Image: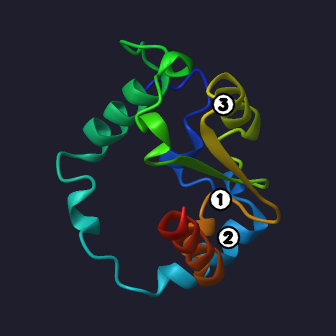
Amino acid sequence: MNQKWFHSWSVVEGNMAIFSKTDLEIVKQLSGAPSLGQETVTQQGKFESFYRDLIVGFGKWEFDPTQVSNPCPENKGNVHIWQGYEDKIIPRKLNQYIVEKLGWIKYHKVPDAGHFFIYNATLYETILRELVNG
């Protein structure tokens, strides 16, 4: 986290190049809005907060995500993944690989959307309707 030989993690540096065009538009819209609870995100300090995120994202997990069993047996529920095709933070191929291995997950492709597409009111409503209607 504090070495200087290699480039730092883009999010830590505030590098906006990690966001898609649609993400940047959403970030501009959200920047003026108050964000409830934002002060608690890094209440233990930025280093500790980002370090924990890195451990979760890149550390060794105690399980293989492709070996998870269906938490909704007998089709009494659904698991969904929505993927923005312009997402530069979560690789599309990663989610596609997981869905391929776990065929019980419903995969939704969201064209012309980035990582923050959930903040688009129309897409949010579409997702909510899908979750409610099954």
Of the numbered discs 2 and 3, the one sitting upstream in the chain is: 2
Residue 65 vertical position relative to residue 25 in the rendered view, above or below: above
Query: Dot 3: what SS?
Result: loop
Tell me the residue at 23%/65% (across/down): 39
Q: Which residue is mark 2?
A: 24
Distance in Å between CA atoms under marks 2 and 1: 8 Å
**Structural distance between the alpha carbons of marks 2 and 3:** 33 Å
Q: Residue furthest right?
A: 111
Q: Quadrant of the N terminus?
A: top left
Residue 103 image label: 3
Residue under circle 1? 16
Q: Quadrant of residue 8?
A: top right
Q: Earlier in the sequence, mark 2 or mark 1?
A: 1
Q: Amino acid at mark 2?
A: Leu
Closest to the observer, 110 or 44:
110
Residue at x 71% of width, y 48% of height: 88
Within-10-Å neighbours for mark 3: few <14, some 14–19, many 20+: few
Q: Considering only vertical position in the picture, is 102 above or below 62?
A: below
User: How crowded is the residue under tag 2: few (<14 C-alpha within 10 Å), some, or many (20+)?
Assistant: some
Residue 69 is at least partly visible in this image: yes
Whole-angstrom CA distance, mark 1 to mark 3, is 34 Å
Q: Quadrant of residue 2?
A: top left
**Residue 3 screen position, x and y as percent:** 46, 23
